[in-house]
Amino acid sequence: MKKALLIVFLVLLVDQFSKFYIKMNFLYGEEVNILGTWFRLSFLENEGMAFGAKLPIPNAKIILSLFRIVAVSALGYYLYRIITKKEHQLYIISIALIFAGALGNIIDSTFYGLWFESSIYNGEPAKFITQDGFMQGYSSWFHGNVVDMLHFPMFKGHFPDWFPFWGGESFLFFSPVFNVADTAISTGVGIILFFQKSLFPKK
């Protein structure tokens, strides 16, 4: 239990610290090279699901936020169950990483609309704001945007002309911009997939 709680705490701490720092020190769309052009901090915000996808229905944002809360609540209960059942330690660590990452992004979508000024329209870094003792941000409950900043554009080039569908077009690897919470989720899923034979031995 203590190890899982420590993982969740550390992931949330690093995730939220990095998001607060980027939100309050970077202009929207600003990029800073960390390791040449291979690793950049690139400030973007995700309004919807993974890779910026959106649900084409009314009130899609609040529906997505509420669904995330229900899903992460169920995941938290599942994490508690596998801890009490003394499942494989690596499996517990994996679920703890996934839970922490999902919770980190839920904090953004639930609260950031209340806590911060908009990053997109002000032309300066957003501020953590209160007015008359109440939060007065760019949106309301469950309508915040998820902050992304990690970018690894390792190399770019062009597909050969004979390549199906994309022949002659340019490409960038790796193009998505993500955050610490996304990294925790991907790491947890990757551990489960890579070590599935050890985690789920045939009886």
Image (tube, helix red, strand yellow):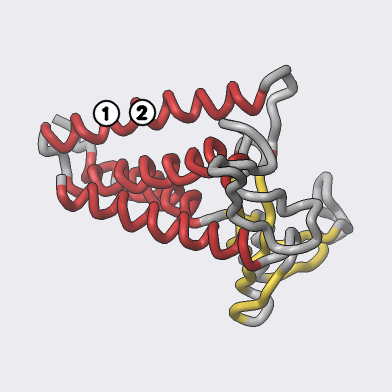
In depth, the one of 154 and 24 nearer the eye is 24
Residue 27 visible in the shown view = yes
Outermost residue toward the top in this view: 58
Label drawn at residue 77:
1
Q: Quadrant of residue 197?
A: top left
Label drawn at residue 73:
2
Residue 193 visible in the shown view = no
Give the image location of residue 53, x and y in percent.
Answer: 69, 35
| Residue at x 17%, y 47% (from the top left corner) | 89
- Helix, strand or loop status at disc 1: helix
Q: Is residue 74 left or right of residue 110?
A: left
Q: Are marks 2 and 1 in contact (CB under 8 Å)?
A: yes
| Residue at x 59%, y 21% (from the top left corner) | 63
| Residue at x 23%, y 43% (from the top left corner) | 92
Q: CA distance from mark 2 to mark 1?
A: 6 Å
* Amino acid type shown at disc 1: Tyr
* Amino acid type shown at disc 2: Ser
Q: Is residue 167 left or right of residue 98?
A: right
Callout 1 crowding tier (Cα within 10 Å): few <14, some 14–19, many ≥20: few
- Helix, strand or loop status at disc 2: helix
In depth, the one of 201 and 4 nearer the eye is 4
With respect to residue 153, does 84 lie above or below?
A: above
Q: How many marks?
A: 2
The C terminus lies in which quarter of the figure? top left
Give the image location of residue 101, x and y in percent.
Answer: 43, 46
